[in-house]
Image: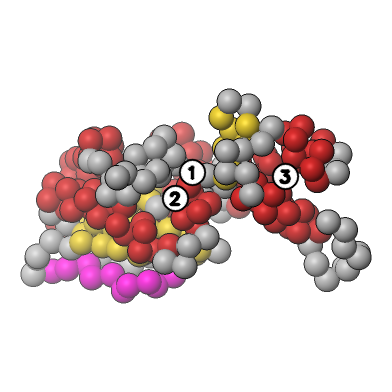
Amino acid sequence: MKRTQDRSVSTSLLKGLDVVSLLAAYPEGLRTIEITEKMGWPRSNVVRILQSLEDYGFVAYSNRKCALTELFYSWSQRDRYGRFRQQYRGLLTALSEKVRELVLLGVREGRGIVHIDCIEWDHAIRVAPAPLTVHGFLESAIGKLVLGREGRSEDWPEGKEDEYQKIKQEGIAWNREESVPGVIAVAAYGYSVGKGEPLLAVAWPTSRFNEEKGRDAIRWIKELRESVVPSVGAGSDGFGYVD
């Protein structure tokens, strides 16, 4: 596909979309050389685009062929949140019964985090998060985990490089009253560590929190996500329909 040069558009983005459109027509996947031939571009350009799409979780390689992932198809659905809620509801329920506190499911949206589902135990004092509210990266536990997971050190807050390096290594992030006074939260990966995937968090009012409860929550998240079968998805990337 040839286009006239227009400074108001991103040619790199358009090329990436062209590759996605091509792969959508070949659900069984294509080898890199086949994509290069079909697109008529230099191999280096194709490889760079595929690496970017793979880094974002939209393509994956199997038997030397590159194909769109279930994450891409989920992302492109109109009711993306609904599918994630269905997939993770069993895990949220099991985790809620273990910690008996607020459990959250969050996803990245642009430069923020959206809590798309939650379960809160029946306490007199409750955290009660606002639904579908966008939260910042730098204070929220899930936001910190996103920044640590992506490993872009230039985005890490100045003076907190050690904290984010630890988050990157351990896959655990804490928010100790940084976004909401009187609330402590810890976040961890869900079924997959891929970009665009939901992340889990547990939150306590400070009056009910102690470090042992925090360690237990992390342990239960790790154990439950390996033992609870997703309502939707059981593949290595956390997706794949189950009949």
- Looking at the rendered structure, the kind of residue marked 3 is Ile
Q: Is residue 136 magenta?
A: yes
Q: From the image, state whether disc 1 or disc 3 is nearer to you.
A: 3
- Looking at the rendered structure, the kind of residue marked 1 is Gly
CA–CA distance in space, label 3 to label 2: 21 Å
Q: Determine whether the residue tagged by mark 1 lies in a helix, strand or loop.
A: loop
- Residue 4 picture location, percent across and down: 91, 65
- Residue 242 picture location, percent across and down: 31, 44
Looking at the rendering, the stretch of residues picked out in magenta corresponds to 125-138
Q: Which residue is mark 2?
A: 197
- Residue 99 picture location, percent across and down: 15, 49
Q: Determine whether the residue tagged by mark 2 lies in a helix, strand or loop.
A: loop
Residue 194, which numbered label? 1
Tally of numbered tags: 3
CA–CA distance in space, label 1 to label 3: 17 Å
Question: Are circles 2 and 1 on residues that touch, CB within 8 Å?
Answer: yes
Q: Give the side of residue 77 with respect to residue 99, left or right.
A: right
* Colour theme: secondary structure
Task: Give the quadrant of residue 234.
Answer: top left
Residue at the top extreme, as displayed: 63
Q: Residues within 10 Å of mark 1 (few under 14, many from 20)?
A: some
Residue 166, compared with residue 231, is above or below; it is above
Task: Give the quadrant of residue 41.
Answer: top right
Secondary structure, magenta segment, majority class:
loop
Q: Which residue is mark 3?
A: 49
Q: Residue at x 44, y 39 (%)?
A: 237
Q: Residue at x 48, y 49 (%)?
A: 71
- First in sequence, mark 3 or 2: give its number: 3
Q: Give the side of residue 183 with respect to residue 178, left or right.
A: left
